[in-house]
Amino acid sequence: MVDYANANVSSEDGIFSTTAIQVNTGTGSTLLPVDIGHEDYVAVIDPDTAFWALVRKENLSDVFCGEEFLKQYGEKQRLLFDEIKTLRFGLKPSAVYFNPTERCNLNCTYCYIPEKLRQSGSHMSKNDLLRALEILHEYFDSNMPAGRKAEIIFHGSEPMLNKEAVFEAIENFKDTFNFGVQTNGTLLDEEDIEFLKSHDVAVGLSLDAHNELISNKTRKTWSGKGIFKKVLSAIEHLGSYCNFNVICTVTSENVCYLSDIVKFFHDLNVPACMLNPIRCTQPGARTIKPSEEAFGRHFLEALEYSYDLYQQSGRKLVVVNFANILISILAPLARKLMCDISPCGGGRCFFAVAADGSLFPCSEFIGLPEFKGGNIFDDGIDAALESEAFRKVTSRIVESIRYCEKCAIRHFCGSPCPAEAYSMKGDILRRGAFCEFYESQVRYAFRKIAEGKEEAFMWDNWDQDTETVLKISSL
Ligand code: SF4
Ligand code: SF4
């Protein structure tokens, strides 16, 4: 009757209660039916544990009025609750977004770093950069399990403007950290790309369009020149390197072309991309915010197209931000990105180091000095993690946000982004800019699961180290 319901988690053991549960009354758990836009199925979700089931519409009453389903769920409810609690409150930082310079050679319309800093800010010196990595090494040595490497991601402004210091840091600390570089790609020559490949550095390139005309609308130099061809050349040089992806920021300028962009990336053999909604933290970004309706519609069309391309070619282009939503449903603890859970990852799973050593919960806050938690050289990392500035972000939970508090999909969405909510609405405890988009994305994810197509959208081996803790196939 209930066709299937499952939740994979990456824990090794759990607590099992054996009593059936009360639902939707008193202290009982909450199970909400959610229309996913599927002909045959409806989702039933416990918003507190992120448990879900896909139920045939004609059998919905069996969930609430029968005993078997509730008994089976009751046996695992505590375990699922503990898992989501660990994900939300029990993790420690394992990554750092490191800004080795304030400057950028581009003046993209939507950048979250204030224009003045990008134009005339300073580089972190090579000595300071190496000293900062030494401090991070000490911190992670005493705060991460032995044998696990923390990740250092150099990113923007444009980290390759301080290339010499960055490359020396990668060389010196290659056995200590896993490195990544998020770059606009315009300053990478063949030799640089060989260096990054040979050091197994994860490379993220930013490109928002499939042609020069659209690309030039948002991503250009200070003198207004486009950079499309240069980025294309970097992608071609990266060739079949599997440790790279392209980030496409979705704005009103490119939202209609998402399917063309997916085709373009697929033709270029790009293994993974992100189609990220523009973050509206800085005023410039708000001028090119796409409508939620248009974004939702074109995004889902692009996902459908990525599926068709996979069927035709046998080669996947993983749209990572959507894959992460699927994972958040299927195996919450295996998710890779931490914007779609609350509190978000900023200040608890990772933090950001600015070019002057300032510490922020996430780079998205770098233009908001009231969220500075200290300085890596003067105050140390522990003090920043415990600072009031970080606490404001790490204590932002969906249960305290109007509308989100009663939303069934709140643990598949997380109500991002606190920096955006603070900047746009003056209050971190407000929803971010794309609620409707997140709703449509989660409904679509459930439809794909109902159709048995979810694997086509996820990276290979996504379920390594996960286990199924509950699978109900009939009552
Ligand atoms: S932002 Fe919207 S979709 Fe996300 S949790 Fe809040 S109400 Fe739900
Ligand atoms: S939601 Fe915003 S602040 Fe949080 S991790 Fe994502 S970008 Fe950073």
Image (spheres, rainbow, N blue to C red):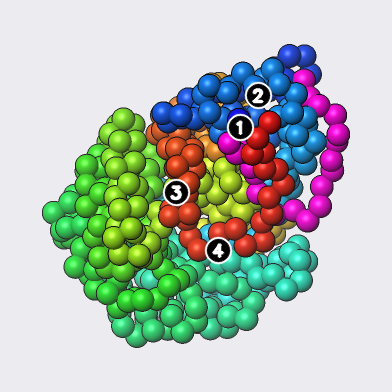
Compare marks 2 and 1 and give the one earlier in the sequence: 1
Q: Residue 453 in the image: x percent, y percent?
A: 44, 48
Callout 2: SS: helix
Q: Along the line of sight, which residue is nearer the eye, 4 or 10? A: 4
Compare marks 4 and 3 and give the one earlier in the sequence: 3
The boundaries of the magenta stretch are 2-22
Q: Tell me the mark number nearer the camera, choosing from 2 and 4.
A: 2
Amino acid carrying mark 2 in the image? Val
Residue at image point 26% right, 48% down: 258
Question: Is there CB contact under 8 Å for labels 2 and 1?
Answer: yes
Amino acid carrying mark 3 in the image? Lys
The disc placed on residue 453 is 3
Quadrant including the N terminus: top right
The disc placed on residue 461 is 4
**Residue at the outermost left position:** 213
Q: Mark 1 points at which residue?
A: 2
Q: In this view, does 431 lie to the left or right of 318?
A: right
Q: Residue 233 in the image: x percent, y percent?
A: 24, 73
Neighbours of disc 2 within 10 Å: few (<14), some (14-19), many (20+)? some
Residue 425 placement: quadrant? top left
Compare marks 1 and 3 and give the one earlier in the sequence: 1
Residue 262 placement: quadrant? bottom left
Residue at image point 36% right, 65% down: 315
Residue at image point 30% right, 64% down: 313
Compare marks 2 and 3 and give the one earlier in the sequence: 2
Amino acid carrying mark 4 in the image? Asn
Neighbours of disc 4 within 10 Å: few (<14), some (14-19), many (20+)? few
Q: Is residue 300 magenta?
A: no
> Magenta-highlighted stretch: main secondary structure?
loop
Q: How far apart are marks 4 and 1 (CA)?
A: 27 Å
